[in-house]
Amino acid sequence: MKLEHIKQLHPDGNHKASVLLVHGACMGAWVWQDNFSPYLYEMGFNVHSISLRNHGRSLKKESIRSISILDYVVDLKSVIKELDGDIFIIGHSMGGFTIQHYLQDCDSKIKGVVLLCPVPNTGLWQLIPKLVLHYPFYFMLSSLKMSWLPIIKNNRRLKRLMFSDSYPINKMRVLTDAMQEESFLAFLEMVFLRLPKISSSPVPMMVVGAENDYLISEQSIKKMAAYFRVEPLIIKDAAHCFMFEPGWEKVAEKITDFFGGLVPTSN
């Protein structure tokens, strides 16, 4: 499977470790390019941003509606196999859910993972009543079409779902246009059909949530962190896609501090 793979590599192997960035649903490698990717590179890491199959500029070989989370795990494994040395993985939303499945049989090269507003190990079932309450017509339309585009392809709806109230509405058009179709099967798997079967993480884990996340509640993040026996980082006044919003640097700093405690400062 030919995947979009954006690389920012330090010359002559002069880097601390590699960081693999995994996007969330309806997105692609593009979500990391403005902020997280250049920041991690400047902090001395080789940075790899991928688009899962049928996302971004990756190969679109089949209908995305029937792609499984397990297919995304295969994509993750294929990229990790190509990388040398110590590796950290950062996954946002669905990417965090995919990582949880990957951890059931992960490579020893993985030294730590960071889950950003991840779909929790208990599933997305709590989201369904909210969508039915707030968007009954569009939820019904999305279900009938097996597509989330009717809900997310609107500036104001996407803003409510994924961004803070303070995020300027005039900046939403570019993001709304960039959002794409997602696998309806993968969505059902995230709700209840295919939940991760790990009782603990085989590698150090950091779990990050957002105080005002419509999709993944703060309570769900805290419950998930307790399950994995880690202390959650909850970002105040932030929403699901905080990586686009002011204050993302503070989160990135805490992530690099977490990484710094797990690998030597230099090779």
Image (tube, grey):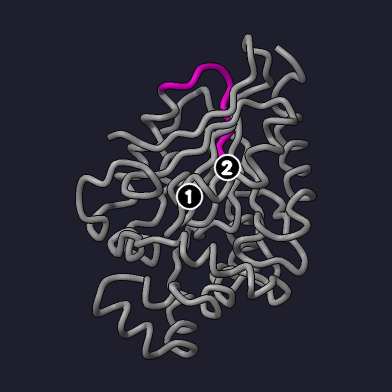
Residue 48 to residue 199: above or below: above
Q: Which residues are magenta?
A: 82-90
Residue 55 to residue 46: above or below: below
Residue 183 to residue 217: above or below: above
Tell me the tag on residue 90.
2
Residue 104 to residue 46: above or below: below
Q: Residue at x 56, y 67 (%)?
A: 216
Q: Residue at x 58, y 49 (%)?
A: 115
Q: Is residue 217 magenta?
A: no
Callouts 2 and 1 close, C-beta under 8 Å: yes
Which percent across, then down, holds residue 111? 59, 28
Q: Is residue 89 magenta?
A: yes
Looking at the picture, tell me which residue is in the foreground, 185 or 246: 246
Asked if one can make out residue 213 in the rendered structure from this viewpoint, the answer is yes
Counting other residues with Cα less than 10 Å from the Cα at mark 2, is it few (<14), some (14-19), or many (20 or more)? many
Q: Amino acid at mark 2?
A: Ile
Q: Is residue 194 left or right of residue 11?
A: left
Callout 1 secondary element: helix
Callout 2 secondary element: strand
Looking at the picture, tell me which residue is in the foreground, 172 or 233: 172
Q: Residue at x 25, y 60 (%)?
A: 65
Hey, which quadrant is residue 241 in on the image? bottom right
Tell me the tag on residue 132.
none
Hey, which quadrant is residue 204 in on the image? top right
* Residue that mark 1 sits on: 95
Counting other residues with Cα less than 10 Å from the Cα at mark 1, is it few (<14), some (14-19), or many (20 or more)? many
Q: Is residue 227 left or right of residue 132?
A: right
Which percent across, then down, holds residue 265? 77, 20
